[in-house]
Image (cartoon, rainbow, N blue to C red):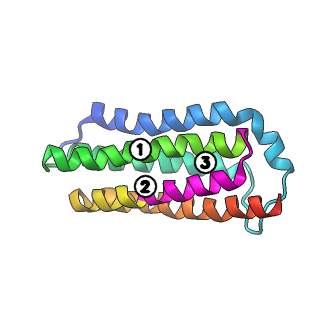
Amino acid sequence: MKIKWKELIIAVAIPLLVGGLSALLTSDSMQSFEQIAKPPLSPPGWLFPVVWTILYVLMGIASYLIYTAKYSAGMAGNALFFYFVQLIFNFFWSIIFFNWEMYLFAFIWLLALLALIIITTIKFYKISKPAAYLMIPYILWVAFAGYLNLGIYLLN
């Protein structure tokens, strides 16, 4: 399969831009985040942008594989619809958690995000197994983020 570079770059740029904008909008809240009590296994703050950058690249590649797959436009369109909905949920979680410090609501929002990611991954799997496999680290990280989010809610 020939790589469509323009489509690949756009597909990777979309989640990176969403994540970058979310980080920009929450950057002032990181100082207060450093001060709150965190559960065991909480990673150092510098790790979060590294992991999220990798995850955004992986999900961008996954969306590219779906966009360019030889499947019905309806099936791919439905999968990409869920992809974009989960991306919107991903964007707003940071604002709810960091800016508004609504930790319980953020946890509930994160559970909805996790469900949307799983639905997206299942839809991707029906079209492109490699695309679905690229989403697995994202599922694992968001599940771990759920543990951290709930722990922060309970400790603060």
Q: Secondary structure at mark 3?
A: helix
The structure residue drawn at horizontal position 39% and vertical position 42%, both measured from the top left corner, is: 84
- Which residue carries the number 3 mark? 50
Quadrant in the rendering for residue 6? top left
Could you tell me how far apart the alpha carbons at marks 3 and 1 are, in whole angstroms?
23 Å
Q: Amino acid at mark 1?
A: Val
Q: Secondary structure at mark 2?
A: helix
Quadrant in the rendering for residue 40? bottom right
Q: Amino acid at mark 3?
A: Val
In the image, taking residue 56 as reference, residue 66 lies left or right, namely left
Q: Residues within 10 Å of mark 2 (few under 14, many from 20)?
A: many
Q: Position of residue 72 (x, y in %)?
A: 13, 48
Quadrant in the rendering for residue 42? bottom right
Which residue lies most toward the bottom here?
40
Q: Secondary structure at mark 1?
A: helix
Q: Amino acid at mark 2?
A: Leu
- Range covered by the magenta-colored residues: 99-117
- Which residue carries the number 1 mark? 85
Q: Residues within 10 Å of mark 3 (few under 14, many from 20)?
A: few
The answer to if 154 sits in the magenta stretch is no
Is there a contact, CB below 8 Å, between mark 1 and mark 2?
A: yes
Q: Residues within 10 Å of mark 1 (few under 14, many from 20)?
A: some
The structure residue drawn at horizontal position 49% and vertical position 59%, both measured from the top left corner, is: 114
User: Nearer the viewer's eye, disc 3 or disc 1?
Assistant: 1
Q: Tell me the chief SS of the magenta region.
A: helix
Q: Name which of mark 1 and mark 2 comes first in the sequence.
A: 1
- Which residue carries the number 2 mark? 116
